[in-house]
Each structure stands twice: as structure tokens, then as C-alpha cells.
Amino acid sequence: MTEPGNESGWLFDEFAHVGDEHLDPAYVASYDRKAGIDPSEDLARLRELGLDPNRTLVDLGAGTGTFAVAAAPFSRHVYAVDPSPAMVAALRNKAERLGLKNVTCLRAGFLTYEHPRGTADLVYSRNALHHLPDFWKAVALQRIAAMLRPGGILQLRDLVFSFAPDDVTSVLEAWLAAAPRSPDEGWTREELATHLREEHSTFSWLLEPMLEHSGFEITDASHRSSKVFSAYTAVKR
């Protein structure tokens, strides 16, 4: 049986590559505490970039909906999209509990979510694109560009490596050494090592040409001092 949107049989199965923990309702129930994400900075940035009650926002890889529900009062409509059924259930419960009528929760991913072409004003994605190998990242970015209107904004945050391959050992060992010891405090060394082995973070010098080739102009790029997280603002040309 194929997943929604994968009738061809050759499409990368993003439903099978969301991370086993993201399919576990018990893990998802504790995700917000573990992730400790404060949406205020990203929300303020998107409001500076034009998010207002006349604008449509797509949140790809919405997780438990922390950002989606924070953005809803400032948006005309938010489409919160995630491939994990446990995550979608959590974000739907959160939206319903808050009485938000302008949040649509959908089980889909970068490669399977269908949005009317040229109708989204902003797309937001945080720590989700790394679930795709680079070939499929490029396809995903092309699909995001297609859903945005000209001048639309992509705000992308992810585990992106802003260093040269020669520095892999030194940078990654420093990152792993700084990880908390307890999973209650965040992602441990073992969990981060699993990410490195099994998921698909890429180099900034590979991701940035993908964005540009997909029809975006990168207007802002920032890289953390750890060299393992990056944030991009990109405008559809």
C-alpha cells in the first residue's frame, strides 16, 4: 500500500523517514518540553516580512504546532503540514483547544503536500528539511517556490553545516560534546549521533545554490557559532 501522494512507487517515502520517535505518541507528548522552542523570534521576523491577517502561511514540518498556533492570530490562514500522524494529532488538538478556526492541519510532507500554485504568501519550515536527501531537498524547494506567489517569502531554519568537509571531525565532536546528558534537557549526544547517521543534514554551500536554482533570492543567511544550524530568508523571484 502506498502513502498519499506516492502512487508512482518511485517517490522518496517521507512518511517512512520522519524519525521513529516522531511516530511515537508518548515521545510526541513530551516533544514541546524537550524541544523548548520559543516561536516569538521567528514570528516577529515573519511579521516584519509581511505576515498579517491578509496573508496565508504554510508551515511545513509543523510538528506539534507550536509555531502554527502562535502565527494563527496574525494570519488569514495557516496550513500546518506534517507527515507524522502523531504530530498531526497533537497539533490538531492544540489548535482545537485554543479555538483557532484558521488553522488547517494536514498529514503530508514537502513532496506530497499540494497547495494551489502561487497562492501562499509565506512558507515557514524549522528543522524538517533535513529528513530529505539532497536530491529530494532540491525537489522540495522547487515545490515550495511553486506554491508561493512572486515576492513570497520562505523562512527556513535547519541543521545546516556551515563548514568545510575537512572540519567535519572537529566541528561535530564539539557539537556532540556540548549536548545535554539527560534527554529531559534536550537532545543527547546519542540522539544527535543518530541524526548524523540516519538523517540528511547538508552543507550550506550545497543548500544555498539549491535555493537559488529553485527561483529564490537569499536575502538573509545566518549561521550559528556551532556551525551546525543556519537560518535563511529567501524571496521568490
Image (spheres, helix red, strand yellow):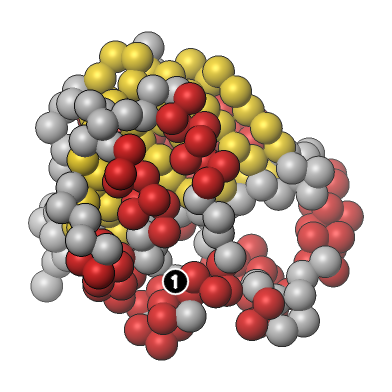
Q: Amino acid at mark 1?
A: Gly
Which residue is more in the foreground, 235 or 92? 92
**Residue 84 falls in image quadrant:** bottom left
Residue at figure coordinates x 41%, y 77% from the top left: 28
Q: Quadrant of residue 87?
A: bottom left
The answer to whether residue 214 shows anywhere in this view is no
Residue designated by label 1: 19
Observer-nearest of 233 and 210: 233
In the figure, 212 relative to 185: above or below?
Answer: above
Residue 223 at what x, y percent from top left?
71, 37
Q: Is residue 100 above or below residue 84?
A: above
Q: Residues within 10 Å of mark 1 (few under 14, many from 20)?
A: some
Which element type, helix, strand or loop, lies under badge 1?
A: loop
Image spot of residue 118 (x, y percent): 19, 23
Q: Please give left or right for residue 71 compared with residue 177 in the image.
A: left
Give the x, y percent position of residue 145: 32, 27
Q: Which residue appears at 17% of the width and 38% of the height? A: 115
Locate residue 163 relative to residue 108 in the image: left or right: right
Identify the image quadrant of the C terminus: top left
Q: Position of residue 154 (x, y in %)?
A: 42, 30
Give the quarter of the image for residue 190: bottom right
Instruction: From the viewer's side, name the closer residue of 102 and 109.
Output: 102
Which residue is outermost to the bottom? Answer: 26
Q: Is residue 146 above or below residue 227?
A: above
Picture residue at 57% right of the left edge, 74% below the top? 34
Which quadrant is the N terminus positioned in?
Answer: bottom left
Q: Is residue 1 visible?
A: yes
**What residue sits 77% from the left and 81% below the top?**
181
